[in-house]
Every structure is written in C-alpha cells, then in structure tokens.
Image: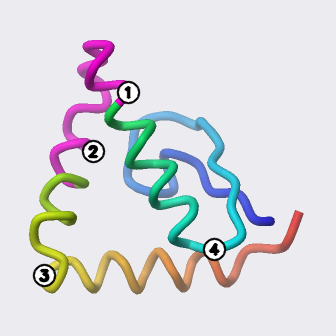
Amino acid sequence: MKTMTCRDLGGPCDLEHHGETADDVINAQDRHLKEAEKAGDATHQEARDAMKNRWRHPKQSLGWYRGTQAAFAALPDR
C-alpha cells in the first residue's frame, strides 16, 4: 500500500489517498475532487477541471499519467 496526497496529484490540499496501484490513488483523487466540487470548494476547482480534461483526452494526458505512475512506483510501501 502506498500513499499520495491531493497535492502530489496536482490538487491544493494534503488529503492522503492510499492504494495498491497508481490507478487506485488517481481514482481516489478523482472522487475527492468531485466531492469538493459538489461541496462548492473553489480551492479544488482548478484541479477538478484539469482532471476532467485528462479523462476526456486520455491520449493527450499520457505524460501526466506516466509521471504519476513513476512517482507512485518510487514511493515506499507503507
């Protein structure tokens, strides 16, 4: 199990996301940003918009995705 924060994934806060894979933490970040948007948290809006764009244009977002995978792989297991 590894941990990345919202900030590690491009967001504005230090909420921790835990997962066995990079995809686990990316999906947790997506859920977190959706919840923040629903709650009217404007501090997360820029990160939410960026995440929406990545989901809509996955080929264009491969650099971010591969970078996140590499950062996740480099983390120690907890």
C-alpha separation, residue under disc 4 versus residue under disc 3: 21 Å
Q: SS of the residue at dot 3?
A: loop
Q: Position of residue 5 (x, y in %)?
A: 58, 48
Mark linked to residue 12: none
Q: How crowded is mark 4: few (under 14 residues within 10 Å), some or many (20 or more)?
A: some
Give whichever of discs 2 and 1 has the lower sequence position.
Answer: 1
Residue with the mark numbered 3: 60
Q: Mark 1 points at which residue?
A: 35
Residue 3 picture location, percent across and down: 71, 57
User: How far separated are the C-alphas under marks 1 and 4?
Assistant: 22 Å
Residue 66 horizontal side relative to residue 43, left or right = right
User: In the image shown, does 29 or 70 lie closer to the viewer?
Assistant: 29
Foreground tag (4 vs 3): 4
Q: Give the range drawn in magenta.
A: 35-50
Badge 4 is on which residue? 21
- Residue drawn at x 56%, y 72% as measured from the top left: 22
Identify the amino acid type marked 2: Ala
* Amino acid tagged 3: Gln
Indicate which disc, 4 or 3, sits on the residue closer to the N terminus.
4
Disc 2 crowd rating (10 Å Cα; few below 14, some 14-19, many 20+) is many
Q: Does the magenta stretch include residue 43?
A: yes
Q: What amino acid is at disc 1?
A: Glu
Mark with earlier residue (2, 3): 2
- Find disc 2 in the rendering and name its residue: 47
Left or right, 50 with respect to 6, comes to left
Mark 2 vs mark 1, foreground winner is: 1
**What secondary structure is found at the residue carrying circle 2?**
helix
